[in-house]
Image (spheres, rainbow, N blue to C red):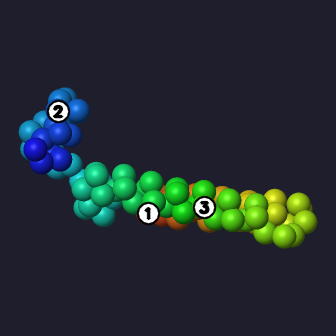
Amino acid sequence: MPPVVELRRIYPSLPEGTPLKGPGGMSIIISIIISILITGIAVLVLYLVQKLPIDSTMKQMAQVVVVVVGVVSLLSYLDVF
Protein backbone atom coordinates (compact mmCIF):
# COMPACT_ATOMS: atom_id res chain seq x y z
CA MET A 1 0.00 0.00 0.00
CA PRO A 2 1.55 3.37 -1.00
CA PRO A 3 2.36 5.86 1.78
CA VAL A 4 -0.12 8.41 0.39
CA VAL A 5 -2.99 6.00 1.00
CA GLU A 6 -1.73 5.39 4.55
CA LEU A 7 -1.58 9.14 5.22
CA ARG A 8 -5.09 9.58 3.81
CA ARG A 9 -6.30 6.94 6.24
CA ILE A 10 -4.53 8.71 9.14
CA TYR A 11 -5.85 12.15 8.11
CA PRO A 12 -9.32 11.46 6.70
CA SER A 13 -10.38 15.11 6.98
CA LEU A 14 -8.02 16.14 4.17
CA PRO A 15 -9.79 16.80 0.87
CA GLU A 16 -8.94 14.38 -1.93
CA GLY A 17 -7.01 16.98 -3.95
CA THR A 18 -4.76 18.08 -1.08
CA PRO A 19 -1.12 17.31 -1.89
CA LEU A 20 0.74 15.60 0.92
CA LYS A 21 3.90 17.60 0.59
CA GLY A 22 6.17 19.07 3.24
CA PRO A 23 8.82 21.80 3.09
CA GLY A 24 10.27 22.45 -0.33
CA GLY A 25 7.79 20.11 -2.01
CA MET A 26 9.15 16.95 -0.35
CA SER A 27 6.80 14.28 0.81
CA ILE A 28 5.86 14.20 4.47
CA ILE A 29 7.58 10.85 5.04
CA ILE A 30 10.93 12.12 3.74
CA SER A 31 10.51 15.28 5.82
CA ILE A 32 9.92 13.22 8.98
CA ILE A 33 12.93 10.98 8.27
CA ILE A 34 15.27 13.93 7.74
CA SER A 35 13.99 15.63 10.91
CA ILE A 36 14.68 12.45 12.89
CA LEU A 37 18.18 12.22 11.36
CA ILE A 38 18.99 15.84 12.29
CA THR A 39 17.79 15.22 15.84
CA GLY A 40 19.78 11.98 16.07
CA ILE A 41 22.96 13.68 14.89
CA ALA A 42 22.50 16.44 17.47
CA VAL A 43 22.02 13.85 20.24
CA LEU A 44 25.11 11.95 19.07
CA VAL A 45 27.22 15.11 19.09
CA LEU A 46 25.93 15.96 22.59
CA TYR A 47 26.98 12.50 23.74
CA LEU A 48 30.42 12.92 22.20
CA VAL A 49 30.82 16.34 23.86
CA GLN A 50 30.21 14.65 27.22
CA LYS A 51 33.13 12.31 26.49
CA LEU A 52 35.59 15.14 25.80
CA PRO A 53 38.39 15.48 28.37
CA ILE A 54 37.76 19.16 29.12
CA ASP A 55 36.45 21.01 32.16
CA SER A 56 32.73 21.22 32.86
CA THR A 57 32.38 24.89 31.88
CA MET A 58 33.71 24.23 28.40
CA LYS A 59 31.46 21.17 28.09
CA GLN A 60 28.42 23.29 28.94
CA MET A 61 29.45 25.91 26.38
CA ALA A 62 29.91 23.23 23.73
CA GLN A 63 26.51 21.71 24.59
CA VAL A 64 24.80 25.09 24.23
CA VAL A 65 26.48 25.60 20.85
CA VAL A 66 25.42 22.13 19.67
CA VAL A 67 21.81 22.67 20.79
CA VAL A 68 21.62 26.11 19.13
CA VAL A 69 23.11 24.82 15.87
CA GLY A 70 20.77 21.80 15.92
CA VAL A 71 17.67 23.92 16.50
CA VAL A 72 18.67 26.45 13.84
CA SER A 73 19.39 23.73 11.27
CA LEU A 74 16.09 22.00 12.01
CA LEU A 75 14.16 25.27 11.74
CA SER A 76 15.93 26.23 8.52
CA TYR A 77 15.14 22.79 7.08
CA LEU A 78 11.46 23.25 7.98
CA ASP A 79 11.52 26.61 6.11
CA VAL A 80 10.90 28.71 9.23
CA PHE A 81 13.83 30.99 8.36
SS for tag 2? helix
Q: Nearer the viewer, mark 3 or mark 2?
A: 3
Figure label count? 3
| In the image, residue 32 above or below residue 53 | above
Answer with left or right where residue 25 lies relative to residue 51. Answer: left
The tag earlier along the polypeptide, 3 or 2, is: 2
Disc 3: which residue: 44
Measure how far apart labels 3 and 1 are at the Cα level. 19 Å
Left or right: 60, with 23 as reference point: right
Residue at the disc numbered 2: 9
Q: Residues within 10 Å of mark 1 (few under 14, many from 20)?
A: some
Give the mark toward the camera: 1 or 2: 2
Residue type, label 2: Arg
Which residue is drawn at the image coordinates 52% and 57% (left, top)?
40
Instruction: Please state the horizontal and vertical placement of residue 74, each as a whole percent of the image.
Output: 50, 59
Give the mark nearest the N terminus, 1 or 2: 2
Q: Secondary structure at mark 3?
A: helix
The residue that mark 1 highlights is 77
Residue 66: where, in percent of width, then height?
Answer: 67, 64
Between label 3 and label 1, give the one nearer the viewer.
3
